[in-house]
Image: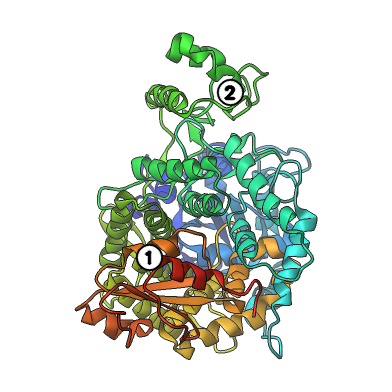
Amino acid sequence: MVPNRLAEQTSPYLLQHKDNPVDWYPWGPEALGRAKEEDRPILLSIGYSACHWCHVMEHESFEDSETARYMNEHFVPIKVDREERPDVDSIYMQAVQAMTGQGGWPLTVFLDPEGVPFYGGTYFPPEPRHGIPSFRQVLEGVAEAWRERRSEIQSGAGRIVRALEASTRMRPAQGLVSPRVLDEAERTLALQFDAVNGGFAGAPKFPPASILEFLMRRIVHPGDGGIDETKRSETVRLTLERMARGGMYDQVGGGFHRYSVDAHWLVPHFEKMLYDNALLARAYLHGWQLMGNPRFLRVCRETLDWTLREMRAPEGGFYSALDADSEGEEGKFYVWTSDEVRDVLGEDAEPLIPYFGLDAEPNFEAANVLHVAGEEMDDELLDRLRARLYEARSKRAWPGLDDKRLTAWNALMIAALADAGAVLGSEKYLAAARQCADFVLERLRDERGFLLRTYKDGRASLNAYLEDYAFLLEALLLLYEATFETRWFAEARHLADEMIERYADPAGGFFTTAADHEPLVTRPKDIQDHPIPSGNSSAGFGLLRLAAFTGHKQYEQPPIELFRLLHEAAGRHPQAFGHLLQAMHFHFGPRREVAIVGESVEPLVRVVRGAFRPNVVLAALRPGDAEAQEQIPLLHGRETLDGRGTAYVCENFACKLPVAEPAGLSRLLDEADDGPR
C-alpha cells in the first residue's frame, strides 16, 4: 500500500494513519486550497496517539477500504494531532460541544471550504449502536446535505463563527476584583467534594492537581469563606491519599494514568501523560510539605523517577505519552492476576496478594488493576517485591510511546523537577531540569528566536502557542529559584516580553496564537484549566511572579486585566479555573519577596524551602555576581550584615530590617498575614 501524505509528518499520531487507504492531508494550505478549488466539504478528524477510541475508530473505519473510498470521493480528509495543534482542536471542539452538548476524542467535524464547521461528533461506530448512527450513515447524510441543502448550511455560517468568537469578545468587568471570589470558589468546591472517595463529583474522575494546589494555598493563607480549616485540609488529604492508593496510580512502576473511569480511583484509562505526572508530582510534594505524610513524598519521588526512567529522551527532553493499549488491548501491560504475581514472586507473593487486592474478584476483565487494598507493608520489603514485578512486567509488550517533545509539557516537567530538586536537595532532579531547559531553549526555536511547539526525529516545527511561552516562563522562574543561576531568570524575562508583545489582547487576556500565526476561522483564547492550566492562567501567574522579582508594573497589569475578565466565571466554576485561582491567591497575598545575599546563603535558603510557602519569591546573590544584580531588581542594593549571609523580607519592595540568623528569618516569614490583602 502506498502511504498517504501523512508519511512526511513527524507527529506519532499522524504517522499511525500514514498507511490508511484514506487520502489524508495534514492541516495546511494544500488541503484547504483543494477544498476551495473543488468546492468540497472538509472531513476533519482530530485525536492523539495515546487515545484508545481513536485507535478503535481507525481500525473500524479508516482502515476499511470502502469507507475510505467514500471519504476520498466526497470530502477532503484532514487529520490533526490535537497535541501539536491545540488551536485547531480548541476551535472545533468548541463547535462540536455547542452542536451536540458533548465533546471528546476522536473528534469528527465537517467544515465548509472556508473552515466553518456545520456538523460534528466524536466517535462514530461502523454500525448503528445505542442510538448513534454509523460512520457511513454520517458520511452519506453530510454528503447529501452538502449537495441538496447547501444554502441552509451557508446561512448558518455567520452564526457559527460568532459563537466561536464568544471568548474573544469577552470584556473585563468594571472596577476592582475582590478577593471574595476566592471564598466563593472554595464554598463551591466544598459542595462538590466527594467526602467518601476524595476528588470532586462522580465518575469519570480526573486528577484535580490545580484545584488541590489552590486549596493548599488556602490552608497556608485562608480567607473568609466560612470553610472549616479541618474540612479544607481533609479535602486535600483524602484526595491525595485515595489517588495514591488507587489503580489510577501505577503501583508497580510509579506515575499516574490519565483518569479513573469510576468514582473510586480504581480502574484507570491507562494512558500515561507527561503533563499529568508533572502536575501531580508537585501536588504531592506540596502535600508532603504541608501534612508530613510520607506516602505523599514517596509518590512524588516515584512519579519523577518514573518520568526520568521511561519518558526521558537522550537529549534531555521528555516524551509526551505512553499509550493505553498494547497488543491491541487496553491496559494489558499493567494488569495482573494472582497467579501471575505468584509465578514471579513465589512464596514472597503471599503478603502482596491482599495488599494489592488480588484476593478479590477481577476488577478489569479477567485480571486486576493493582491498588492498595490491605494493611500497610514494610517499605523496604514492598520496594523489593515491586522491583521484581517491574522487571517481569518490562518483558511484556510495551504500550506505544508518543515520542514527540512538546515545549509546554516539557516546561511543566522542568517546573516539577526544579521544585522537587530545591525542596528535597536532589541534584539528580535539578540536573534533569537544567538539561531539559537547555534542550527547549536551544532546539525549540526558529530562525527568529521565537519558540516552536514540537520536536521529533531531530526536527523542531510548528509555531509555539501561548501555553508554550507561559508554562516555560513559570518553569524558568522556578528553575532560577532552585539554582540561583541568573541565566534562567534572564530567559524568563525575555520570554515574558515576547509573550506580551505577540499574544496579548489589548481588551484583556491573551490569545492562544501569536499575532503572526496563520489565519483560522477565529483567533481562539484558551481560558479553562482542565485538564492542565490554560495559557491565560499560566501567563497571568508567571507575570505576577516576575513582577514580584522586578517591581515592574508592565508585568502586573496584564494579569489584573485577566482577573477582571474571568473572575466571575472562576468563582462560579472553580474546577475549570484552578490555576487562575492560584494566580489570584498570589495577587491578593499576603506575598513576600525574599532576597538573600552573602557568601553562605544555604542556611537561610533552607528556611524558605523548609515549608510550603506558595506566596514567596526567592532570589539570592553571592559576592561578585554582577549579572544577578543587573538582571534582578529584587537584589539591587542588598548588603550583608557584617559579611554574613543576610536575608531581606519585603512586600512590594518595602523591606523589613535584614536578618542574618535562620530563626530570625523564620519569624519574619511566619508573621505573614493570615488572609488576602
Please name the residue shown 73% across and 39% down the image: 128
Q: Quarter of the image containing the N terminus?
A: top left
Identify which residue, 431 or 646, lies in the foreground: 646
Number of callouts: 2
Colour convention? rainbow
Task: Looking at the image, tell me whether mark 2 or mark 1 is earlier in sequence order.
Answer: 2
Identify which residue, 468 or 30, lies in the foreground: 468
Residue denoted by label 2:
355
The answer, for residue 567, to whether it is visible in the render is yes
Residue denoted by label 1:
605
Quadrant of the image occupied by residue 487: bottom left
| Residue 337 spot, x, y in % from top left | 55, 17
Please name the residue shown 74% across and 70% down the image: 183
What type is the residue that disc 2 sits on?
Tyr
62 is higher (above) or lower (below) than 654: above
Left or right, residue 575 beside residue 672:
right
Q: Is mark 1 on a helix, strand or loop?
A: helix
